[in-house]
Amino acid sequence: MNVIKQEDLIQSVADALQYISYYHPKDFIDAVYAAYQKEASQPAKDAMAQILVNSRLCAYGKRPICQDTGIVTVFVKVGMQVQWEATCMSVNDMINEGVRRAYLHPDNILRASILDDPAGKRANTKDNTPATIHYEVIPGNKVDITVAAKGGGSENKAKLVMLNPSDSIVDWVLKTVPTLGAGWCPPGMLGIGIGGTAEKAMILAKEVLMDPVDIQDLIAKGPQNRVEELRLELYDKVNALGIGAQGLGGLTTVVDVKIKEYPTHAASLPVAMIPNCAATRHIHFSLDGTGPAVLQVPCLEDWPKLNYEVGEVAKRVNLNSVTSEEVMSWKPGETLLLSGTLLTGRDAAHKRIQDLFACGESLPPGLDFKNKFIYYVGPVDPVRDEVVGPAGPTTATRMDKFTEMMLAKTGLLGMIGKAERGPQAIAAIRKHKAVYLMAVGGAAYLVSKAIRNSKVVAFPELGMEAVHEFEVEDMPVTVAVDSEGVSVHASAPKIWQAKIGKIPVIEESS
């Protein structure tokens, strides 16, 4: 009978979360690099180049792959012959202490994103606890643990449907994937859970995302059962939708499709789908009573040696002197290099500004958006000599409902975020002759290298959601919505779907 020590579990969880914050799973990087090499869409290829360069920088610098360092999910399989060291802590408490230790590590601070009282005050717990933990009791004398850190952008795109037994799973997936937009930061993986009950299907979909990327092996050997046939069919047809990296149109939207089944009721067909983003982070380890887990450091020479170069086609923009006339000249799909000052803000800051205006009050002293751009970001705290920690964009659609207010009342010229904008925001952009620029999600550390100075200028009590002023130099962005309201996220996937030409467009019924 193996005795598992409290400190071994705590330290193993802490080590695992630090590890996955800066080391991508190697199989995932190999899959993205293979997709990069065959990609025919230049915007998508550039986006994957940024993701791959960012991954290598993070592995060497031991800094987070993405500024959204995730909500922690832990799958625990406890052997029936295991004994726990005498302790007053529950296994939940041990795991959460490991989370706390990891996210507060002074050499690699991880962003705390977990809010208590979610339907009320939504107060940050400051240490990213608690984790979401799933247990299974199994034969054996070990504790097997899988730790994952899941970003909100991809987690928010989770879907569940209760199909009729005669309905087509493939049709539902192909109808649903385009509705996810690009906020889940493709290229990534789709986890699909089939069967059980509603909550079981969701857990299956999440758990199967922890499996290795092996679709190319499956293609080579051929399917041996219906699930493998379904994986191959969905992999081919989802990629044929032409959504591409970051939703910019291209050949690869998913690098794998994972499926896990469970028996279900004769009247039911629960199907859950959860995407994993370009910041895929998970690791498995076992404890057998001999000490904390030993996590193998990957060979960093195996990472693709790419340099991200925007080339001569990029247009340089001075943010300190840019005019509305210049903004109106930018075209969808153009690459810009931004230099100068911009302001940051995301959900909580926008809500504060909305409340101030509703009460007839002015913006706080020192906060002026006139002729400026706002960057939707919640950066990681800096360490050592950093100006700012990893600072990649957050999903822009969450700010859609604030866009008209910001453009009408603050003199803002435009916005920077990730993924597409919805009809409400696009209408406001067109009305005010503004613009929306897209930075690559999943390249947060690379983006931070373009930030030369940072200071908080408003709402410091909001922590990572405070308004910062960034001074940037050659920050790469793409014109995603121009002043006429033309969106690359609406046009590019259709162009590439037609180029790929494998399946018809599946229209969502009204």
Image (cartoon, helix red, strand yellow):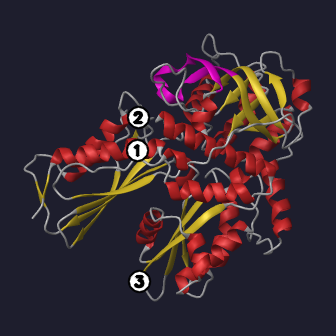
The residue that disc 3 covers is 263
What amino acid is at disc 2?
Ala
Is residue 391 found left or right of 7 in the rendered image?
Answer: right
- Frontmost of labels 1 and 2 is 1
Magenta stretch holds residue 480: no
Q: Is residue 468 magenta?
A: yes
Residue 191: percent from the left, percent from the top?
Answer: 52, 66
**Residue 411 seen in the figure:** yes
Magenta region = 450-472
> Whole-percent x and y of residue 262?
42, 79
Judged from the image, the secondary structure of the residue bearing numbered disc 3 is: loop
Badge 2 marks a residue whose secondary structure is strand
| Mark 1: secondary structure | helix
The N terminus - image quarter: bottom left
In this view, the residue in front, 210 or 376, is 210
- How would you classify the magenta stretch by its main secondary structure? strand
Label 1 with label 3: CB-CB less than 8 Å: no
77 in relation to 479, above or below = below
User: Which residue type does callout 1 highlight?
Assistant: Tyr
How far apart, in angstroms, are the residues tagged by discs 1 and 3? Answer: 35 Å
Specify which label sits upstream in the sequence, 2 or 3: 2
**First in residue order: circle 1 vs circle 2:** 1
